[in-house]
Amino acid sequence: MKRRLWLIPLLGLAAFAIYYQHWNTLQAAPRCRSRCPDPAAAPFNEYANRDGRQEAEADLRRGRLTILTYGLQAPWSLALMEGLHRDHGIELRAVAGCVVTKEQMRYVEEYNEVMERHLVAIHGEAFFDQEVRKARVIHAERMRALAASTTASEE
């Protein structure tokens, strides 16, 4: 008989956990409905009603030069970001990672279309190709230096 006494508190704890989970779900439902009245509209997409062209033109009027990106960054992206910022005052900003909505893609395309047109008018048609080439060279030099320092420290 004493061997089964541990079973009673265990069953009571399990019953409490199940009831608490049920109660918590019931309490959360009204909060969710108040935040998200239309379930079809959830989750909220901040880029759904934004116009990338207008925002890019507004940024140009303020003197902000920005190129938006999304997705997996290239290995030399850090060198490109540093070079664009240091040499030309251009910010390279990631707005999303690998999970991208159609609205985000549309927004980035519209925004960059205006910015790229402006930057090409200032710096010439081959501007982006030259900057990418420079960034790749800088990245390769950094990787060689890192490899050399790693092998030197192992010896």
Image (cartoon, helix red, strand yellow):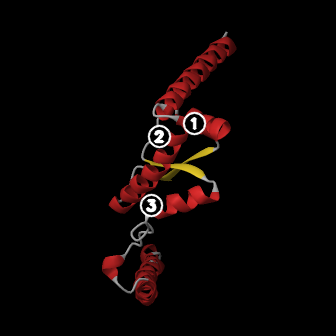
Residue flagged by tag 1: what amino acid is it? Leu
| Residue beneath the point at 58% across and 32% down | 79
Rendered position, 105 above or below 24:
above
> Pointer 1 and pointer 2: residues touching (CB < 8 Å)?
yes
Q: Is residue 82 above or below residue 29?
A: above
Q: Residue at x 51, y 62 (%)?
A: 55
Q: Which of pointers 3 and 1 lies earlier in the amino acid sequence? A: 3
Label 1 – label 2 distance at C-alpha: 9 Å
Mark 3 or mark 2, earlier in chain = 3
Q: Quadrant of the N terminus?
A: bottom left
Near mark 2 (Cα within 10 A), the count class, few <14, some 14-19 or many ≥20, is few
- Residue on which the image places disc 1: 78
- Residue topped by disc 3: 52
Q: Are marks 3 and 2 in contact (CB under 8 Å)?
A: no
Q: Position of residue 23 (x, y in %)?
A: 43, 88
Amino acid on which the number 2 mark rests in the picture: Gln
**How many angstroms separate mark 3 from mark 1 (CA)?**
24 Å
Q: Quadrant of the C terminus?
A: top right
Residue, disc 2: 73
Classify residue 8 by image quadrant. Answer: bottom left
Residue 120 image offset from top left, x and y in percent: 49, 40
Is residue 41 visible to us here? yes
In this view, the residue farthest toward the top is 155
